[in-house]
Amino acid sequence: MVVPSQSVLRDYILRALIALGGSATKRDVLTWIDNAFGETFTDEDRQSVHSRNEPKWENQVAWVRHQMVDAGLIAPFSAGKSERGLWALTENGWAAAAEIVSVDESSQSAQIPSVSGEEWGRTRGRAKHAVGGRAWLIRPGQGGSTLAKTWRRESFVSLSAQNLSIDTETATETDIREAVDSGYPHLDYAQRLQITQAAQAFIVRMSADDIVLTVSDDHAWIGTLVGEPYESTHEQSMLRRSVDWLAEPVARADLPVPVPGLLDKPGDVVDLTIAIDALAALAAAFTDTADDIDADSLQVASSVMIPDASDSLAADLFMPRAVLQEWLDVLADRRQMVFYGPPGTGKTFVAEALGRHIVGTETDRVQTVQFHPSYSYEDFFEGLRPVVENGNLTYSVVPGPLRKLVAEATTPGNESQAYVLIIDEMNRANLAKVFGELYYLLEYRDQAISLQYSPSKDFRLPKNLFIIGTMNTLDRSIAMVDAAIRRRFPFVELHPSIEPVSGVLDAYLSAQGSTRYRARLLAALNEGIDERDLQVGPSYLMTSSAATQPGLERIWKYDILPLLDDHFYGRITPEQVRAQFGLAALSRKARRGEPRLTDDGDAVEFGREHERVSDEGLADIS
């Protein structure tokens, strides 16, 4: 037999805490479990996993307790000195314990000392669960792998802190900064800043139950902090924290995303809280030996799967399903893409349809922003904004649409859900100014960076966030888009002369039961436009208004002709534009050999003998 599964060890811990009045030290809990269930442990289970002679089963129990803290069954270690190190049941822990008591009373399968109602209430009131927890990377610095081995052997992590004189129990971040400045005057200010930041994290921001990770050679070791910082006389590790290490290391190559991308961040103490779910799940996998009832709450979300293109999506966009599937495959691989082309080719419509398809019925997970020449990093991501507080004007860092959507996408429980950000008219803005350091994250989703307005926090773009941009080649040539954006975004052209856009209007008219007149009209229009990026897309003629002659005339007068006037400004006169591209001129060309509908709805051959007839009498040109 091997060490019992996490679910069994969880019950052992709950039983022990019930018997011990709801809270006890680690040693008391382990002693109770050994006395009650020690016969279930084999000789292998009792083998030492550290030189401090901790049996394997005790190491496993310590880790299961950590997972019970995450699950809200046991309270994190109290900051109060009188209760430091106590394992105490929370409200949820008492509820789980009550179920065990109920089962035991009915089956009499185990004898557990009774707890009086008065004691139950007293100890129950003591256990208050604090939601949270952080993760940290600790480097041994100059001590190298030798010091890292000492950490694991003697169950602690440390900072050198040779010249740091401070009371760790009462120290604030300001106290630590002053102590570093006083103790290390011989160092450069940048070096003092690094020591200050590491000491502040180690003394103030770290707390019991936080996950710690250290890397030595090609392996990573994971543990949990126990208790408060304390001092030592060893010059390489004078400031210490106790740690319960996992018995076995993890190959560096097996570390889950986003941990590998965070290991290159500088500093002796690095905040890895952004990866805490991945580390907790990894620890659970290494401590579990059978079925684990808490696995669902500790699993890291797998890569978000984009649904395949459907027949309904193809029907909505009037495009072949195979083409749409190819675009979705590109999005799945790259997490971002850009649709570009002339006006009216459906760039925004396609982007929004794909976004809705990706998220399903939860359409609030699709957000759209539009760039413009004055758009900035502060508008898009985050920046200082004036805020009135208590009648006083102050400035606070306010998140923009991207930061808000990332916050939602990375909220625990949302990691398996897809989120889509659509950036319309993307090339109208100064992209280097808008994206800033986010350029890096667009290419390296596994990495994290410091932000210019939030330098103390690491940020990464999660893999469940998809970005779809659109670029209008008429507003601003995409030749002006810098190479950095081109490298990070796959570009998909939507052009009236090539598939799938060239077939969209025909497919639309066929679905409407209409003739091909409007498709011929558009083809005749674009044949006369010699510049490729100036050709007109089909969406102008895919409205209900375009199905009637008056509506078509309005579209031509107020949409298409002004567009052509701008195209040919300085080359030909407006009169020449209307003579060549006016509705009457193009209509005669488009209607050769095509039937038309009279006011009575009868089909009449529109031949050469009718070429001089005006279209004004047509009531329905569908």
Image (tube, rainbow, N blue to C red):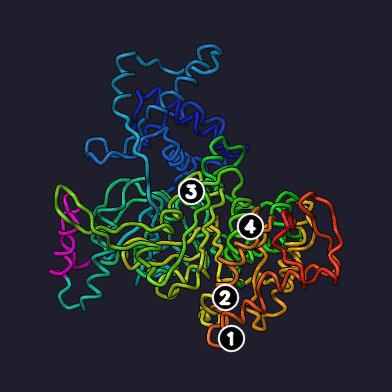
Name the residue carrying label 2: 473
Q: Secondary structure at mark 3?
A: helix
Which of the 4 quarters of the picture holds residue 609? bottom right
Q: Nearer the viewer, mark 1 or mark 3?
A: 1
Residue 491: quadrant of the picture = bottom right
Residue 531: horizontal and vertical position, in percent?
64, 83
Alpha-carbon span between mark 2 and mark 4? 27 Å
The residue that disc 1 covers is 572
- For badge 3, the amino acid type reads Ala
Q: Are marks 3 and 4 in contact (CB under 8 Å)?
A: no
Q: Is residue 326 above or below residue 474?
A: above
Disc 2 vs disc 3: Cβ atoms closer than 8 Å? no
On residue 551, the disc is: 4
Residue at the bottom extreme of this rendering: 571
- Please say if 618 is above or below 344: above
Whether residue 176 is in magenta: the answer is: yes
Mark 2 vs mark 1: in front: 1
Element under label 2? loop
Q: Are marks 2 and 1 in contact (CB under 8 Å)?
A: no
Per the image, the residue denoted by label 3 is: 280
Residue range in magenta is 161-183
Disc number placed over residue 468 in the picture, else none: none
- Residue density around tag 2, few if under 14, some if 14–19, many if 20 or more, within 10 Å: some
Residue depicted at 40% across the width and 63% down the height: 380
Query: Which of disc 4 and disc 3 is earlier in sequence?
Result: 3
Tell me the element at label 4. helix
| Image quadrant where one finds the C terminus | bottom right
Residue at position x 59%, y 72% in the image: 561
Q: Amino acid at mark 4?
A: Gly
Counting labels gives 4
How dense is the environment of label 4, judged by Cα within 10 Å: few (below 14), some, or many (20 and up)? some
